Image: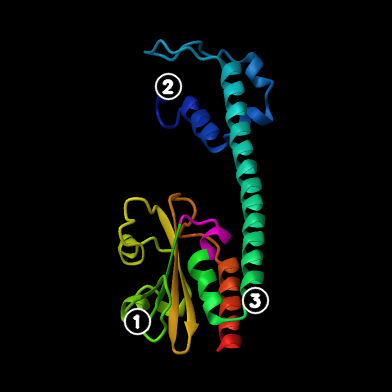
Amino acid sequence: MKKKNDNGSAEELVIQYLQKNKNFFINYPKLLDILNLPTTIKSSNKIIDLNAYRSKKIKEDYDKLKKQVSEILQAGSSHIISQERILKASLKILNTISLAKLLNILINDIKILLACDFVNCFFTSNKLKYNGLNQIDIRVASSYFRDKFQTNLNQNTKGILVFFPNKSKVIKSYILIKINYNKNYFIIALGSKDKKKFTKDQQVDLIEYLIQIIQIKLVDLN
């Protein structure tokens, strides 16, 4: 005869069954009324209150669901605001009548239009001069845009030193935008004090739309 605690004992079989069927008492709640549940854990003074446990579990599930819904609503609201900002910036860019005015928007106005804390604009050639437009070596700039992408959200700390000189202590997140122009390109660096403003997994469809608008206008003004 097998002992009580052997692997093949009735108790072990029940334990194994319950471990594999975790919803057993949910499907058969009446069993809880006839079972003798302990009021304390053995070798511990901790008191078990089944009703309190259920209430706590329900509250935790509710709080978790509430948080998820809140995040979804917040993301939706944020996306709508971003759409409005991109649309406003696009209309302003399309209405420009000169390259100088377009550069002025990219250097001075884009920060307000896109709600960023810092914006720096670079060009990979010394042939274009404008107040506030910085020159950058094309090889250095290209190293941040491999695989022909026109946006960079990698949050490389070296990028802060290159594109936001003297701002390394305040920049918490940033995005780099590449705009092609006459075999060279502009780099627009958008920086924020908020680490959640720009993240690696962020969608860039709206930004890419703005890039296309700027490139179309540059061709028109050329």
Which residue position holds label 2?
A: 4
Q: CA distance from mark 2 to mark 3?
A: 83 Å
On the picture, is 98 further left or further right than 177?
right
Looking at the image, residue 52 lies above or below residue 198: above
Which residue position holds label 3?
A: 94
Looking at the image, residue 173 lies above or below residue 20: below
User: Circle 1 sits in a helix, a strand or a loop, which is it?
Assistant: helix
Q: Residue at x 63, y 36 (%)?
A: 66
Looking at the image, residue 160 lies above or below residue 101: above
The magenta segment: 109-117
Q: Is residue 112 magenta?
A: yes
On the picture, is 86 further left or further right than 39?
right
Sequence-first disc among 2 and 1: 2
Q: Are marks 2 and 3 in contact (CB under 8 Å)?
A: no
- Measured as percent of width and height from the top left, residue 57 is found at 58, 27
Q: Nearer the viewer, residue 14 or 117?
A: 117
Residue type, numbered disc 1: Ile
Q: CA distance from mark 3 to mark 1?
A: 27 Å
Which residue position holds label 1?
A: 138
Sequence-first disc among 3 and 1: 3
Badge 3: residue crowd in 10 Å (few <14, some 14–19, many ≥20): some
Residue type, numbered disc 2: Lys
State which mark lies toward you, 3 or 1. Answer: 3
Q: Residue at x 63, y 19 (%)?
A: 32
